[in-house]
Image: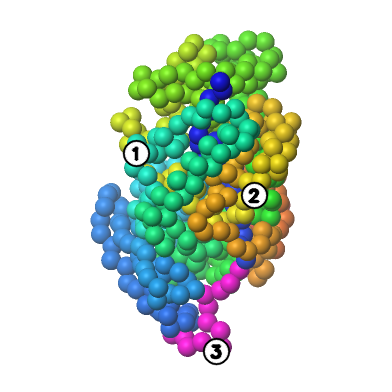
Amino acid sequence: MNRRNRATSIAAAALALTLVLSGCTTLFATNSAPTKSTPTGEQVTDNLDPFYSQVLQWKNCGENLQCTEATAPLDYTDPAAGDISLALVRHVATGNERIGSLLVNPGGPGGSGYDFVKDSLDYATDATLQASFDIVGFDPRGVGRSSAVSCYDSAAMDEYVYGLTTAERGTDAWIAELTASSDAFAAACAQQTGPLLGTVDTKSAARDLDLLRAVLGDTHLNYLGYSYGTFLGATYAELFPEKVGRLVLDGAVDPSTSNFEVTKTQAVGFENALRAYLTDCLAGKDCPFRGSVDSAMTTIGALLNSVDASPITAKDGRQLGGNALLTAIIYPLYQATAWPQLSTMLDTVLHGSAEAAFQFADAYNGRDADGKYTDNSTESFMAINCIDYPYNADPTVMRAQAAELEAAAPVIGPFMSFGDIGCADWPYKFTGERTEIHASGAAPILVVGTTNDPATPYVWAQQLAEQLDSGSLVTYTGEGHTAYNKSNSCVNDAVDSYLVDGIVPASDPQC
């Protein structure tokens, strides 16, 4: 009997950024609404004034680091309905010519910008930006140290993420097992999180971004967003084009692409990245594969199917199925510098060990060596995506899409299908329309794309730069997910010159 990870819907969703623009409204006052002027001199409605006029209380929390919390409305359509907190950390500008704040988002959704800046400042930004800006990391609503989505304890998360089904993939019984697991998870999220669960959409997070801009004392938003953070930044630009300062969107997402096309494009992206890894691997000395790239791809596909049918038991008793192994493969594909570790991991699995694969999968899922989930990234990822996008779990539709995914990406595709199950019965539904983002009237926006980015394929950067009325594309020819501060000086110089001096490339520098 084939046994597969119960959390197939997680794997499909987690490997495909299901992102959407859900329409646009504005926080700014209309002529008929009472208004007040905030400390930055802008007009906001009376019910938002307490939020926009708040004074942040910073405290030292590390070398040249300060931390605080801001208060935001739970629901911007009804600001009196309750408050949430947003956690911030800033690295104070080291130079003498401070420009202002630069807010940073690492992606996800569900990634902690707070941890990104506090623990990985030099990975997030370079010394040039650190001299000119206060680098501000924040946890979006629903994430980490901010008012957060909560669903399961660690034991229940283990079962949800790594538990195995008994029915054959694609059958009605298999779909029923996944549906029951997903419904139980959704119910737990609703019970543990409360009304916040219905307000973690990206549009609300973009409104929070404007609030943070104002309370930080900036009249315009300067922002560096990676991966999903590009969608958050583009959504902000659509909502508040007149407040756009200098926005860099690296590893861009095309907000106009359909849910299935997002999944399909990303499956092909990871398939191409796997082939690029194998090309490099087979040219070296310590590759666990022999022969051609095609034969190695066949071997990996057979390995995934093998552990899917007969999981490998790890020392802690967990069983490595196909979905968990795919997560372990994809995790090091995000950066080419991790390819040697990918070789080591695959070699151990080929020899019957699950330990290294679980280390990679656990790192991706935020689980430590003691079995504790150290963040809520999986929970917030699901909560944000489920409300940000429409889903259709019609078995006939999903099976047809599964066949198309397998044809497009024979190794990766089969394990990225049926993802709609995880969100189809979510307590809060997507409302809006998936559409292009133009941000008419916004200042120039820099879009960065990597030609063989597996997670946010290059075509999305091209499409977003074309959609934005003021978009300007910077191309990095290379491997890996996102390019700034991790590729070459051409990309870094283009981004730094834009953020610090406002210089927009006359044309794509083709880095």
Circle 3 residues within 10 Å: few <14, some 14–19, many ≥20 = few
> What whole-number distance in Å separates the C-alpha atoms at marks 1 and 2?
29 Å
Instruction: State whether the magenta stretch is mostly helix, strand or loop.
Output: loop
Q: Secondary structure at mark 3?
A: loop
Region in magenta: 24-38
Q: Are marks 2 and 3 in contact (CB under 8 Å)?
A: no
- Residue type marked 3: Ser
- Reading the image, the residue beneath label 1 is 154
Residue visible at 43% across and 77% down in the picture: 48
Give the camera-side residue of 301 and 292.
301
Circle 1 residues within 10 Å: few <14, some 14–19, many ≥20 = some
Q: Secondary structure at mark 2?
A: loop
Mark 1 vs mark 3: give the one in front: 1
Circle 2 residues within 10 Å: few <14, some 14–19, many ≥20 = some
**Quadrant assignment for the N terminus:** top right
- Reading the image, the residue beneath label 3 is 32
Rendered location of residue 86, percent (x, y): 37, 60
Q: Are marks 1 and 3 in contact (CB under 8 Å)?
A: no
Residue visible at 50% across and 42% down in the picture: 180
Residue 127 in the figure: left or right of residue 333: left
Q: Can residue 316 be spotted in the picture?
A: yes
Quadrant assignment, res 407: top right
Rendered location of residue 194, percent (x, y): 39, 60
Residue 297 in the figure: left or right of residue 334: right
Give the camera-side residue of 203 and 472.
203
Mark 1 vs mark 2: give the one in front: 2
